[in-house]
Image (spheres, rainbow, N blue to C red):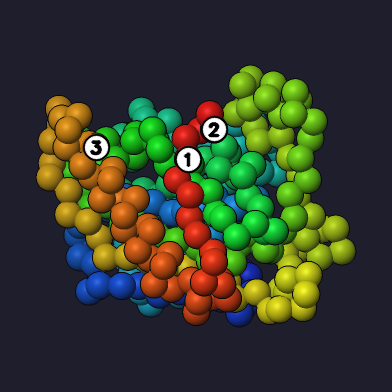
Amino acid sequence: FLYSGVVDLVLGYYNATCIREGPPLDPQGRYLFAMSPHGIFGVCRAFSGGSLWRQMYGDIRPRWGSFGGAFFIPGVREFSLCSGCLDASRPVLERAIARGESVMLIPGGTRELMLTDGHSTTTKLVLLGRKGFVKLAIRHGLQLVPGFCFGEKWVHDIVLLPASLRAFLHRRFKLAGCALAGRWWSFVGKVAQADGTPISLGYVWGAPMSIRHDPDCDDQYVQQVHEQYMAAVLDLFERHKQRFGYSAEEQLDFVAAED
């Protein structure tokens, strides 16, 4: 499903652009693609499919990691399975990697989802303290590919449930505790901002970061790679933001999950 014409229709609806920096990847290599930000609906996932992905990455077909609760929600479960998603828990991901598969994650998770704010000039990324994906890449010798999705914060408005209910849902079920509203208050994404400015939805993939294989995951090296990854994401954002309709005042803010 993820590589079908349906995904091309989704990307066409948003007049989306995808950029791959660096040389073509080795189809025999193994990779961990790390996307930011999560967004409310995760429209960025569409950039990992369709003919656009095949043109850029050929036969490299990473498996999506999704939070475990998704597989207990009717509708979401079926869509996730049709898209080839896996539970994002470490044991499941490591079994996929052992089979020779590449994986794709959104490190910020549901915490980042709840911080989506299309009315703010600051995009918050929940990356401080989120080092599990870096450890996974180091432990298994995967090349880490940073990416950033532009424009998704304007595609849907976030509708937050009461704070106490959100806290309970996230603590108990890892659910975001919010809803979304697109065009006509539906799931259909917007194609223009409130002032009529067209939304330029785009995704930029950076060049892969070469990771030293270290099964023991030295803490100092993990910290080093984590900092390099955040610097790479910031660099992608600053160099491409104006192309996708972001003003000069737009900025990134790296935050912790508990902030």
Q: Which of disc 1 and disc 3 is earlier in sequence? A: 3
Given the image, on which type of amino acid does mark 1 rest? Val
Q: Is residue 102 visible?
A: no
Q: Which residue position holds label 1?
A: 255
State whether residue 49 is above or below residue 74: below
Q: Name the residue located 76 percent from the left edge and 40 percent from the top edge.
A: 160
Q: Which residue position holds label 2?
A: 259
State whether residue 210 is above or below residue 204: above
Q: Which residue position holds label 3?
A: 223
Residue 164 in picture, x, y percent from top left:
75, 23
> Residues at badges 1 and 2 in contact (C-beta under 8 Å)?
yes
Q: Name the residue located 54 percent from the left edge and 66 percent from the top edge.
A: 249
Q: Which of disc 2 and disc 3 is earlier in sequence? A: 3
Q: How many marks?
A: 3
Given the image, on which type of amino acid does mark 2 rest? Asp
| Marks 3/1: CA–CA distance | 16 Å
